[in-house]
Image (cartoon, helix red, strand yellow):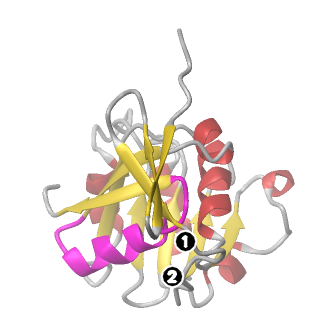
């Protein structure tokens, strides 16, 4: 296994990293990322939840919550983490998603976007995360799925990675993709879920 450093090209107002695998990621040269008005709650302070919170905090207010209080950087209740959040990420294993979503449901703001980075199929329900979330949340909450070659360790190390943000509602997909502006995650959107 070889690790190859990306090649840096200066193209005027943005820096472009061309990786050996062929994909391109770019970051604006400005010293600060544009501020986003999103309030993000992340349920699940494991490796992925923590990694995503670190790359989104430049553009949003991010609150991290976990059932394991020792995993949280600050000790807040789940209700406090969800208070006023217009985007809610579930970063939990597939077997824990139904319970995590059901316990959070009452505290999630009306119309908030629900995001899942959960991979795999629930072992007993035999449903993917979108099926599980459809059973718990009404259509008033757009549901977004994030997939791609995202590894928590690479995101924490600020290594470039890709994500596909999928939602039937293109404005919800764009709102979630915008959270990653200026970070190591290059997000593209699709309505094909």
Tell me if residue 13 comes above or below residue 95 in the rendering: below
Q: Residue furthest top?
A: 1
Whether pointer 2 and pointer 1 mark residues with C-beta atoms closer than 8 Å, the reply is: yes
- For the question of whether residue 146 can be seen, the reply is yes
Quarter placement of the C terminus = bottom left
What span is in magenta? Answer: 167-184
Closer to the camera in the image, 79 or 144: 144
As drawn, is 12 to the left or to the right of 184? left
Query: At which x and y percent is residue 29?
Result: 56, 68
- Mark 1 packing: few (<14 Cα in 10 Å), some, or many (20+)? some
Q: Secondary structure at mark 1?
A: helix
Whether residue 135 is visible, yes or no, is no
Position above or below: 45 against 62: above
Residue at image point 71% right, 56% down:
67
Q: Residue at x 59, y 56 (%)?
A: 52
The image quarter in which residue 134 lies:
bottom left
Would residue 47 be found to the left or right of residue 72 on screen? Answer: left
- In magenta segment, residue 170: yes
Question: How far is the residue under mark 2 from the one under mark 1?
Answer: 6 Å
Q: Residue at x 48, y 69 (%)?
A: 181
Residue occupying the point 54% across, 82% down: 34
The disc at residue 104 is 1
- The residue where tag 2 is placed is 108
Asked if residue 76 lies left or right of residue 176, the reply is right
Would residue 153 be found to the left or right of residue 123 on screen?
right
Q: Is residue 128 magenta?
A: no
Point out residue 1 in the picture as x, y percentages from the top left corner: 53, 9
Residue 127 sits in quarter:
top left
Q: Position of residue 81 (x, y in %)?
A: 68, 77
User: Total marks drawn?
Assistant: 2
Q: Is residue 152 above or below residue 55?
A: above
Work out whether residue 45 or residue 158 is closer to the camera in this orientation and state it.
158
């Amino acid at each position: 296994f070889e690790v190859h450093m990306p090649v840096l090209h200066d193209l005027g107002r943005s820096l472009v990293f061309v990786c050996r695998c062929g994909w391109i990621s770019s970051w604006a040269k400005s010293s600060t990322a544009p501020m986003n008005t999103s309030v993000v709650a992340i349920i699940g302070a494991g490796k992925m939840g923590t990694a995503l919170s670190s790359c989104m905090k430049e553009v949003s207010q991010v609150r991290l919550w976990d059932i394991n209080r020792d995993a949280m950087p600050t000790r807040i209740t789940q209700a406090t983490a969800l208070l006023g959040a217009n985007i809610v990420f579930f970063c939990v294993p597939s077997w824990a998603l139904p319970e995590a979503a059901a316990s959070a449901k009452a505290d999630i703001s009306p119309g908030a976007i629900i995001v899942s980075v959960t991979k795999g199929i629930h072992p007993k329900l035999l449903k993917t995360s979108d099926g599980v979330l459809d059973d718990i949340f009404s259509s008033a909450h757009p549901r977004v799925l994030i997939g791609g070659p995202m590894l928590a360790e690479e995101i924490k190390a600020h290594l470039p990675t890709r994500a596909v943000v999928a939602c039937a509602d293109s404005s919800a997909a764009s709102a979630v993709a915008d959270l990653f502006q200026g970070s190591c995650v290059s997000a593209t959107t699709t309505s094909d879920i």
